[in-house]
Amino acid sequence: MATYSKINGFTVQSLGSDPSPLVEGQVWYNTSSNTLKASPNFLGTGSWASAGTLNTVRPNNWGGGSGTQTAALAFGGYTVPAAVTDKTESYNGTAWTETGDLMNTARYGSAACGTQTATLCFSGNAVSPNATAITEEYNGSSWVVKNTMPTSKADGAGAGTTEAAKYYSGRGGPPAYTVNTDVFDFDGTNWSVGTANNTARSQAGGGGTSTDAVFVGGGPPTVAIFEKWNGSAWAEAPDLNTARRAAFASVTDGDNVMLGGGEGGNALTELYNGVSWSVQAVQATEHYKNAASTASSTAAIAIAPTDSPYALCEEWTIPTAITAKTFTSS
């Protein structure tokens, strides 16, 4: 069936029809259509779907979140009636379970990073509206107090792991509630002052690693600014299509970012592909001031919405498809 010819030094199979099933990375010449083709892995269209419901209702959540779409962690935040909670819940891809592992300091507006069994939670409002410098680490069974941040902060963003984390921007207070460009780095034991980001703001989406982090949106006033950290410097990147604050980000890396919800963005979702932001599917229920699993731009979970039902969660998924692609010349 097949013959072979060499094109630019590569051996390319000649076929009368496209191979079936397609395998990612194939290259072939279709002799029927006289076209050179390949089978890259393309992203499909993203969508939101209902996920498990939290056991503890958290309106205007402002709680912490970490992990993945199928192994997430939710902690802290507001409850009904209005109070700050220290409860922790884990998600297995289907249902939420209260772990019984209480945080040492109940808080909301915290930053966090890590996995379901190795999470770092830092900053936040311990007793409204007081910011805190307290840091805690979750090891899968209990919360352990770690060394504190250089100063008390709230409403900032976080990235990294329990061994190499980054806190950026946010606000202090009281008595000073002004937003700032403060950045702190954690080495698994101690915090130190890092390189300041470019634009002062709070309530921005963040995520990634300590050497490849993103910082999106924020306020006040509400902005569309997007900054990326490459391990040595912050750089401006293309702005969002819609300015917003209190949105949540889920980050594969600095070139693959999903930002969802947010005040100003309502239920809107945007996706960054390393070049520009594109508008995606809207959420069924507006989510802002909430937590999310933060490990992937193509698979995430938004934890608790702004409006009733306050315990509802939603899963974000972009399917991948291996598709035959024809090479063209211009």
Image (spheres, rainbow, N blue to C red):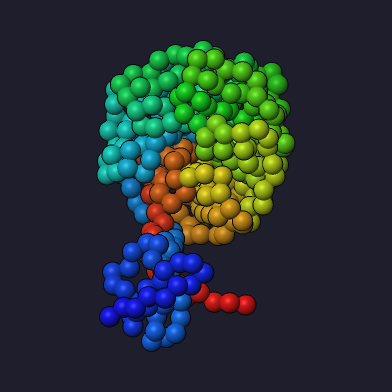
305 or 4: nearer the eye? Answer: 4
Query: Which residue sits at x=65%, y=42%?
Result: 227
Query: Which residue sits at x=72%, y=37%?
Result: 199
75 or 143: nearer the eye? Answer: 143
98 or 21: nearer the eye? Answer: 21
Specify whether 106 is left or right of 190: left
Q: Is residue 296 visible?
A: yes
Image coords of residue 275 (percent x, y): 61, 56
188 or 179: nearer the eye? Answer: 188
Which quarter shows the N terminus? Answer: bottom left
Image coords of residue 168 (percent x, y): 62, 30
Specify whether 94 is left or right of 125: left
Query: Which residue sits at x=44%, y=41%?
Result: 295
Which quarter shows the C terminus? Answer: bottom right
Q: Is residue 113 above or below residue 123?
A: below
Image coords of residue 54 (percent x, y): 33, 37
Judged from this view, the residue extending furthest toward the bottom is 32
Q: Quadrant of residue 102?
A: top left
Counting labels gives 0
Query: Which residue sits at x=44%, y=45%?
Result: 296
Image coords of residue 203 (percent x, y): 60, 36
